[in-house]
Image: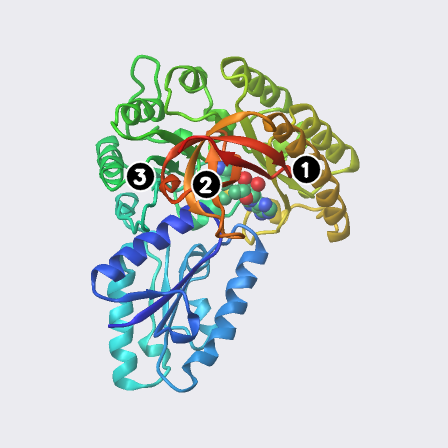
């Protein structure tokens, strides 16, 4: 039996895929270690959305080669970069044994065992022993369904679909994750019921374009999309307290979904709504299929149903051809909406995407300056949106000890604000009220009110 070190890069979907891999390895009797120095098997689950993420994973794999100096170690790349680069990774990283793509996570345990067997028997690094599987597999969306829950874990991610058909011109996801494929509703409901039976109180539904769930497979009923039908079914799960989802696309945010926030009490008051740019010219070049005006009207409609909803976003600065004026429009729009928080990304050129072929790539110094400038706007609003909580009582779901100070506990509000508080052991895993004493913008600090 082997000790397996798994490191994950990128989004929550990647985290969720790694959890499935870990579950299957544990089930077969292996152990998962967080100490790379004691690993018999190193698996890096990669991200390709930006070049930096790929470089980090390649650098880490290079560094970890030293582990195999005095014993056989199996090395594998999983996920998005494995999918997009395939066998070429074997040339780039000579000590690599496994390359497993995004539709084959459920085969990893089997491949790991095969690689261990070959390596321990042969005691040599020979590419003839390498396993590469980046094929498509129908129904692979239903293979991400098992969990490894920690002690008193109350939150969990649930993957409801794979792939993306939107073809934003900057984005590599359609190439790494394939076309949209959704799981049947009954499978998802049953997975959530199992989680709740194990103590989970909050689930986050995951999909690249989560609100377009099921649009190719299932019918709209009574004006309700398959995604809204799923939310309604999950609302009925006894014991589930909170329901989140990420990431939606603005175009899939129709009336039926907006009004769900007003009538499904488990659906929390937070939406992550990727804007990408505030310039209509750039949105068009990105193939985002909405305008700045439509985005504003969508935010207004969401806020009219749920006035205190937290809205977070993703914005890319320095997309090819983005002028000072285009950027100024993004800045202005971000300031007008006043997001609770945002991920601001410098545009990263991704091979074979339409935007990579565009002229007028923006120099890094300009992307850097816009990134800093926009973060100032975002940070100002993050603070402004958090200040009103000071002095108030909020309901939080306590996730456990704070990572930075284990003497304190940490939880989240329904609006996804992080709250660090003085509590007691019985608060771990509980929904409770906390009085907020101060805010740093990103984190609220307070004291538990219920015993
Ligand atoms: N659901 C999201 C949407 O509506 O587009 C997609 C999630 S994507 C994996 C996460 C974020 O990464 C995107 O929203 C985008 O802001 C950013 N991103 C994607 N490709 C990028 C690129 N080439 N350069 C910089 N940021 C990028």
- Secondary structure category for the residue under label 2: loop
Residue 88 appearing in the image = yes
Viewer-nearest residue: 134 or 112: 112
Circle on res. 379: 1
Viewer-nearest residue: 376 or 388: 388
Tell me which label, 1 or 2, sits earlier in the chain. 1
Circle on res. 423: 2
- Secondary structure category for the residue under label 3: loop
Viewer-nearest residue: 4 or 56: 4
Percent position of residue 311, x then y: 55, 28
- The quadrant where residue 254 appears: top left
Q: Quadrant of ligand 1?
A: top right
Residue under label 3: 200
Q: Nearer the viewer, mark 1 or mark 3?
A: 3
Percent position of residue 167, x then y: 50, 39
- Secondary structure category for the residue under label 1: helix
Tell me whether circle 1 and circle 3 mark residues in contact (CB < 8 Å): no
Residue drawn at x 49%, y 51% is: 407
Percent position of residue 295, x then y: 59, 23
Ligand 1 closer than 8 Å to label 3 CB: no
């Amino acid at each position: 039996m082997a000790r397996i070190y798994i490191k994950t890069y990128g989004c929550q979907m990647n985290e969720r895929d790694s959890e499935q891999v870990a579950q299957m390895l544990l089930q077969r009797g292996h152990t998962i270690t967080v100490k790379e120095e004691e690993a018999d098997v190193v698996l890096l689950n990669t991200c390709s959305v930006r070049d930096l993420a790929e470089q980090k994973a390649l650098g880490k794999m290079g560094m970890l080669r030293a582990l195999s100096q005095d014993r056989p170690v199996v090395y594998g790349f999983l996920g998005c970069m494995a999918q997009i680069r395939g066998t070429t990774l074997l040339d780039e990283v000579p000590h690599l044994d496994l390359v497993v793509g995004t539709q084959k996570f459920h085969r990893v345990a089997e491949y790991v065992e095969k690689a261990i067997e070959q390596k321990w028997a042969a005691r040599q690094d020979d590419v003839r022993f390498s396993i590469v599987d980046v094929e498509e597999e129908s129904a692979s969306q239903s293979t991400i369904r098992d969990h490894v829950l920690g002690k008193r874990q109350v939150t969990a991610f649930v993957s409801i679909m794979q792939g993306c058909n939107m073809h934003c011109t900057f984005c590599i996801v359609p190439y790494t994750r394939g076309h949209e494929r959704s799981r049947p509703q009954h499978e998802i409901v049953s997975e959530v019921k199992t989680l709740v039976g194990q103590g989970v109180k909050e689930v986050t539904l995951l999909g690249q374009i989560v609100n377009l769930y099921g649009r190719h497979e299932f019918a709209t009923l009574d004006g309700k999309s398959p995604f809204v039908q799923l939310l309604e079914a999950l609302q009925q799960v006894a014991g589930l307290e909170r329901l989140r989802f990420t990431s939606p696309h603005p175009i899939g945010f129709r009336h039926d979904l907006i009004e769900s926030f007003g009538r499904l009490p488990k659906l929390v008051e937070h939406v992550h709504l990727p804007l990408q740019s505030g310039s209509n010219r750039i949105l068009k070049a990105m193939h985002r299929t909405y305008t700045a005006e439509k985005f504003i009207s969508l935010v207004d409609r969401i806020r009219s149903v749920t006035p205190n909803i937290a809205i977070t976003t993703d914005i890319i600065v320095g997309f090819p051809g983005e002028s000072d004026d285009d950027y100024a429009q993004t800045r202005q729009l971000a300031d007008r909406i006043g997001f609770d928080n945002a991920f601001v990304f410098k545009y990263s050129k991704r091979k074979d995407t339409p935007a990579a072929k565009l002229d007028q790539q923006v120099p890094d110094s300009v992307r850097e300056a816009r990134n800093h400038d926009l973060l100032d706007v975002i940070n100002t609003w993050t603070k402004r949106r958090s200040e009103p909580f000071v002095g108030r009582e909020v309901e939080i779901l306590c996730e456990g000890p704070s990572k930075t100070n284990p003497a304190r506990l940490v939880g989240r509000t329904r609006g996804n604000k992080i709250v660090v508080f003085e509590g007691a052991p019985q608060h771990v895993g509980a929904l409770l009220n906390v009085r907020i004493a101060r805010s740093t913008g990103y984190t609220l600090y307070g004291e538990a009110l219920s015993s």
